Amino acid sequence: MLLVTTLLFGLVAGLCFTWGNAVTPGIGQLEDMGYLQAFQKMNRSIENPLFFAVFIGSFFVGIATVFINRGISPTHFWLVTAAVAIYFVGVVLITVFGNVPLNQILDKTDLINSTTQELASLREKFEQPWNRFHRIRVVSATLSFALLIIAGIGK
């Protein structure tokens, strides 16, 4: 279970890192319409069964891993528990209460029929908060992944 949790957390950490390191800086260079359309299309594309299985499944597998590993050693148990707790708060909750509401606002916007001023306003309300929430996810996912690697090495 520790190996599966580490793999799933690693996949999410890699996705978050890549998105924050390459995707958002790249599309951030586009004009408002291009940026918003690209983000809208990527958000719609990422919402697929495989992504949800990895993203949501990783947390539930993580909880099971905490319970399965509780009798190994206190240090090991707390490393796994800390990894899952950080992941829950910094990845799952930030996504659900930070990034997803912003994604939903963007998704419901008819970009084609929006004025240039409306597009600029939407981008201003979306881009910086979304990136701020995402930076929290990158750090949290990476730290969680690292803690699980340390727990696995120490096992």
Image: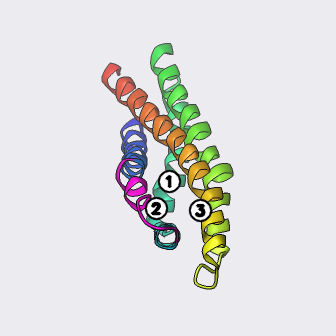
Amino acid on which the number 2 mark rests in the picture: Phe
Q: Is residue 6 above or below residue 28?
A: above
| Apparent side of residue 77 relative to residue 103 in the rendered image (left or right) | left
Relative to the observer, which residue lies in front, 8 or 104? 104
Pointer 1 with pointer 2, Cβ within 8 A: yes
Gap between marks 3 and 1 measured at Cα: 26 Å
Gap between marks 1 and 2 measured at Cα: 6 Å
Pointer 3 with pointer 1, Cβ within 8 A: no
Q: Residue at x 61, y 70 (%)?
A: 119
Q: Residue at x 36, y 44 (%)?
A: 7
Residue 149 covered by magenta stretch: no
Pinpoint residue 10: horizontal percent, then vertical percent.
37, 43
Counting labels gives 3
Q: Residue furthest front?
A: 117
Pinpoint residue 64: horizontal percent, then vertical percent.
54, 39
Foreground tag (3 vs 1):
3
Q: Secondary structure at mark 1?
A: helix
Residue placed under numbered mark 1 in the picture: 55
Residue placed under numbered mark 2 in the picture: 51
Residue placed under numbered mark 3 in the picture: 123
| Apparent side of residue 36 relative to residue 7 in the rendered image (left or right) | right
Mark 3 is surrounded, within 10 Å at the Cα level, by few (under 14), some (14 to 19) or many (20 or more) other residues, namely some
Stretch of the chain drawn in magenta: 21-32
